[in-house]
Image (cartoon, rainbow, N blue to C red):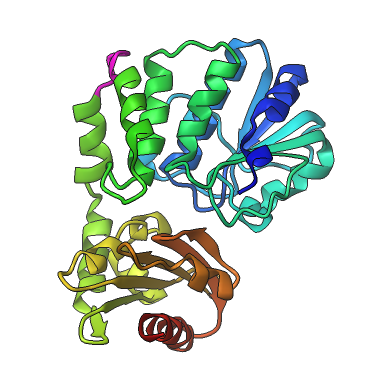
């Protein structure tokens, strides 16, 4: 990543100059993108900006505690115009979904992101592929904007950094994460309550769906690759939503001796969504990119068209090829 793309001054200048701002999260929103968006909404509103937060997709029930999350909506046809569209934690323009339509309705565009595969698709791009979570960059932006931390901002930032680091367990976790946590704890962060909600509690449909995924778990290459598949029928029987599958892939990766894992699920539109995971030093982001996806070295995603069995075979073959290459 070129140093210039880690410089947030251009993005900061656009934010300072804008009066109306659209903050956009990625499709199938997770804790980091929503933590970023809600934190920016709080900060920018405090600075007197007219702020709207958008996302093409349902906010997971598990994240309904985020301050101001009820203000998030799918953009309508008559939104805007805006002085600035700011995307947060969005790795490429496809991940904006219908929010991409706001680009042409905005005088300027900018992004804050931490995906190393980001193609720098906005007018101003602050992309740091070494940051473990985009919320770490949001904290730096708050400093640039002279916005002081409070408990609500702490809740937003904790949600982002904890979920994107696997509760501070992923290889990308670094000292910056814990330096931020020290700041957040000083704001009376209710860490025990939030940790329980984010990492311990599971909705009943998610538990049932996990049972389906584990029941069909298969190992390949002498246990080095774990594969789980979920059909639309599995979701129907369990009464589950797409959000209930978000972390299930990790159960395959947690097996002793497993180096890579994939979870493939059919969505309601007939496409196949893949979650790929790897243990260091193995990586899966290059595999994801080869199928039009992207992400991080140890956590990436793909959207494909075709049958569940056919697409799984293609991605599995790529994993096997890389493992033995």
Q: Determine if residue 250 is in view.
A: yes
Q: Is residue 37 above or below residue 224?
A: above
Q: Nearer the viewer, residue 163 or 324?
A: 324
The dominant secondary structure in magenta is: loop
Q: Residue furthest front?
A: 3
Depicted 207 relative to depicted 24: above or below: below
The answer to which quarter of the image holds residue 125 is: top right
Position of 200 with respect to 289 (left or right) is left
The image shows a total of numbered marks equal to 0
User: Looking at the image, can residue 65 be seen?
Assistant: no
Name the residue located 36 percent from the left edge and 15 percent from the top edge: 151
Q: Nearer the viewer, residue 112 or 230?
A: 112
- Identify the magenta region: 185-190
Assign the C terminus to one quadrant of the image.
Answer: bottom left
Q: Residue at x 36, y 68 (%)?
A: 282
Q: Is residue 169 magenta?
A: no
233 or 179: nearer the viewer: 179
Q: Position of residue 16 (x, y in %)?
A: 72, 17
- Residue drawn at x 44%, y 60% as measured from the top left: 297
The percent position of residue 137, horizontal first and vertical second, equals 52, 32
Q: Is residue 115 left or right of residue 200?
A: right
Viewer-closest of 112 and 2: 2
């Amino acid at each position: 990543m070129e140093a210039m793309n880690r410089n947030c001054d251009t993005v900061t200048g656009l934010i300072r100059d804008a009066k109306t701002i659209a903050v956009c999260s990625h499709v199938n929103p997770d804790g980091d993108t929503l933590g970023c968006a809600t934190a920016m909404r709080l900060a920018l509103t405090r600075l007197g900006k007219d702020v709207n937060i958008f996302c093409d997709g349902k906010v997971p029930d598990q994240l309904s505690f985020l301050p101001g999350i009820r203000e998030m909506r799918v953009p309508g046809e008559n939104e805007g115009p805006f002085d600035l569209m700011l995307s947060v934690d969005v790795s490429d323009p496809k991940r904006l979904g219908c929010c991409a339509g706001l680009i042409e309705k905005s005088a300027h565009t900018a992004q804050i992101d931490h995906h190393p595969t980001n193609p720098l698709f906005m007018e101003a791009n602050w992309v740091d592929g070494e940051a473990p979570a985009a919320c770490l960059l949001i904290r730096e932006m708050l400093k640039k904007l002279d916005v002081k931390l409070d408990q609500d901002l702490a809740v937003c930032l904790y949600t982002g950094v904890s979920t994107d680091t696997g509760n501070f367990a992923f290889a990308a976790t670094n000292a910056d994460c814990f330096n931020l946590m020290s700041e957040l704890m000083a704001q009376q962060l209710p860490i025990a309550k939030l940790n329980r909600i984010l990492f311990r509690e599971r909705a009943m449909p998610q538990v049932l769906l996990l049972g389906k995924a584990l029941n069909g778990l298969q190992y390949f290459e002498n246990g080095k690759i774990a594969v789980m598949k979920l059909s639309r029928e599995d979701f129907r029987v369990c009464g589950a939503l797409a959000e209930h599958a978000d972390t299930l892939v990790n159960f395959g990766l947690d097996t002793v001796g497993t180096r890579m894992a994939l979870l493939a699920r059919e969505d309601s539109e007939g496409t196949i969504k893949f979650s790929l995971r790897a243990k260091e030093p193995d990586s899966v982001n290059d595999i994801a990119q080869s199928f039009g996806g992207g992400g991080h070295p140890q956590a990436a995603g793909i959207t494909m068209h075709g049958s569940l069995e056919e697409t799984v075979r293609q991605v599995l073959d790529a994993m096997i090829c890389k493992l033995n290459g």
